[in-house]
Image (cartoon, rainbow, N blue to C red):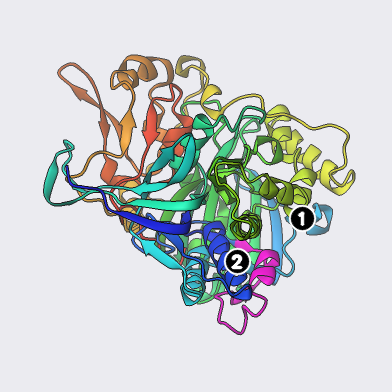
Amino acid sequence: MADREEMEFDVVIVGAGPSGLATAIRLAQLGKEAGRELNICVVEKGSEVGAHILSGAVFETRALDELIPDWRDKGAPLDVPVKDEKFLFLGKRRALSVPTWLLPPETQNHGNYIISLGNLCRWLGQQAEALGVSVFAGFPAADLLLEDATVRGVITADMGRARNGSEKSGFQAGIALRAKWTVFAEGCRGSLANKLEKTFNLREKSDPQTYGIGIKELWELTPEEHNEGLVLHTAGWPMDRRTWGGSFVYHLNNNQAYIGFVVGLDYSNPWLDPFAEMQRFKTHPRLAKMLKGGKRISYGARALNEGGLQSLPRLVFRGGLIVGCAAGFLNVPKIKGSHTAMKTGMLAAESIFQALQNDSDSAVPLTAYEEAVRKSWVWKELHRARNFRPAAARFGMVLGMAYGGLDLKILRGKAPWTFRHRHHDHETLRRAAKSKKIHYPKPDGVLTFDRNASVFLAGVNHEADQPVHLKLTDSAVPIAQNLPAFAEPAQRYCPAGVYEVSEKDGGHEFVINAQNCVHCKTCDIKDPAQNITWSVPEGGGGPNYPNM
């Protein structure tokens, strides 16, 4: 075994998304203001900053205004202000338009921008590097560097291992990145954040986290159907009344539009297929008319946190902090988490900088960060929105949204009660034999497409001869347990065709096509036996999202 190289930093940040880059930028700013040069490192598993970033996205600038007030002069890629917005409740063939003035203010987008979050992160990465931050893309953090029950940094993934785990020629052992403080900004369901929650029992006092899966396509529309600056959301069809879900359509510039669909992963019917639901959604007459003559350019999928305030874990532990969507700061009624993610990163930076100035012992959890979050506008936002998502789980989609609107618009989030999340998403599936099968139409290659054609547009690439990064605790469970009970739902909840059940020798075989993985993390969340663990592949593997 080759010796492991070590590098020393003041702060290591895992993940070059909005929260991680905001942390780095704010730290560097504070260091320059104090005349102290900090050694800050950001590691990113994607082939470049932004390669794995997927979001709607309608962006609220509040945190960016605080972090880089002159972002307009510096060329931030916020070019399409929201000009119009609509909300439709869909039936199978019809659509009921709901006046936006009836909706809670959280759902309205005046003053926001339709953006590519990936492109914003690319720009933020440039701002961080200009301040002296070291940003290393293609270096996934694979494990914690734990010493004396304290996080002392991370270890990056080995490069050059064969599928059987042996070392190939040119093998390079992962690097130990040591730091006084380590910030985990991996995004939703981060593999190391998940490990931290278990190692330090960070969820001891919180509700279970609940998630959705967001599936997104970028289309080029005909000029007649394009309406730059339009934000359209829908609820209703094709979801049933018990299942949380809805769509977004955001018209950006250059005749392009983002088409997206979100399904709550607390759904109960194992026959449900989120990818197929998204394809079916596009056949609604309102969408089909808009997409006619257009061209699909890109595709991606990503899990998102929906638990809100009551599902936040403890944010600090010995040697480190969790920021952004790795903790779960998404505001569900707003359908936005980038601004809250950035703000939590900034608060983390300010707490860490003070600790560095005081030469504080990193073995003592940095509780000043948690206190700062509780006093911030992020906490106020999430507290106001806390009942919105659990109401849908409790009352169903229609009544839950009606209650959520009442809570936000009339009670203004000040109800003297808080609904709880009672189940993990993997606990909610009914038996397949007792559930209604869903028959999805075959893709037509014009409006609707299959998984393989979609994954191709995501630019997915994994080195073929490397260890499978989707690990089964017990290889017998998919066929022996999940197949008879739930018709093995992995072959439906995965939006990339990673999991298949095939016939072999008169029986069945569970096949993992790891090379297809778009890193959405849905399998890690929804597998009913919690038998699948998502881990990082070799550096640079996965999707390469352009303009997403």
Determine which of the numbered discs, if any, sits on residue 377 in the image: 1
Query: Is 226 drawn above or below residue 243 in the view shown?
Result: below
Based on the picture, tell me whether residue 253 belongs to the magenta stretch: no
Q: Name the residue tied to disc 2.
A: 26
SS label for mark 2: helix
Q: Is residue 228 above or below residue 302?
A: below
State left or right for residue 151 relative to residue 390. left
Asked whether residue 99 appears in the rendered view, the answer is no
Q: Are marks 1 and 2 in contact (CB under 8 Å)?
A: no
* Image quadrant containing the N terminus: top left
Q: Earlier in the sequence, mark 1 or mark 2?
A: 2
Q: CA distance from mark 1 to mark 2?
A: 18 Å
Foreground of the two, 469 or 245: 469
Q: Amino acid at mark 2?
A: Arg
Residue type at mark 1 is: Trp
Which of discs 1 and 2 lies nearer the camera? The answer is: 2
Left-right relation of 130 to 340: left
- Badge 1 marks a residue whose secondary structure is helix
Residue 382 in percent (x, y) is at 73, 46
Part of the protein shown in magenta: 58-82
- Residue 392 horizontal/vertical position (percent): 70, 34
Identify the main secondary structure in magenta: loop
